[in-house]
Amino acid sequence: MLCREDTCDIIYIDMAETVKNEEQIEILYAGDGCSLFLRDSWLIFRNGENEYDVTSHGYEPCLYLRRSDELEPVTVHNFLEADDLIRIHRQDCGFTMITGNSYDLEGVCHLLHIAANNGGRSLDIGYLEGQWVLEKLERDGAFSVESAADITGYGLQNVRIMHPFEHSGKVRKTADGKFYLTAKGRRKKK
């Protein structure tokens, strides 16, 4: 169920169908704790309990995630435009980012999930892709040369996105081109 507090009333919307208050819902993606949908003509990204209006401009391009209770949006530079997200769904196709890596709608939504949870206000697609790789390396237990992972197996065509993470000491690259997390690259346990 979605909850929206635009006015004094709380409106509950069943995402499976178009229902209350004559709002039209078209689900583009739902899974892994997040969803992307059109509510009337507004593109919305729901991440856990938070809803973000998704807007963009094609100049860079930039995509903006804005919660109604925040003044500043999360800006994702060199990403897709909002219309691209709708097209990916309606044409059931993928999209190749400026970094050279391709994603389906599930992958794009995971990048939006990382952006929404990052805490930063201005992020770049390369940074988000690198964060995704860090998550996968940690999940796969790649913590040493012996357990290093071939990140092209994660679907990346361009592994150069990892250079900043190498320079910061969060990952190391083995002689055969695999990667593993250092202690600095591991997420802090909560």
Image (spheres, rainbow, N blue to C red):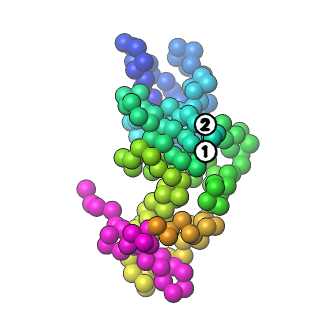
Compared with residue 98, is residue 34 higher up or lower down, i.e. above or below?
above
Q: Is residue 98 above or below residue 113?
A: below
Which residue carries the number 2 mark?
57
The disc labelled 1 sits on which kind of residue?
Glu
136 left or right of 62 in image: left
In this view of the protein, which residue sits in the foreground, 61 or 27?
Answer: 61
Q: As drawn, is 167 to the left or to the right of 187?
A: right
Stretch in magenta:
165-190
User: How many numbered tags mark residues here?
Assistant: 2
Between 165 and 2, the residue placed more toward the observer is: 165
Mark 1 touching mark 2, by CB under 8 A? yes
> Magenta segment: does it hold 178?
yes
Quadrant of the image containing the N terminus: top left
Q: Residue at x 44, y 65 (%)?
A: 134
Q: Secondary structure at mark 2?
A: strand
- Amino acid tagged 2: His
Question: Any mark on residue 92, and which?
Answer: none
| Residue at which label 1 appears | 60
Q: Nearer the viewer, residue 32 or 57?
A: 57
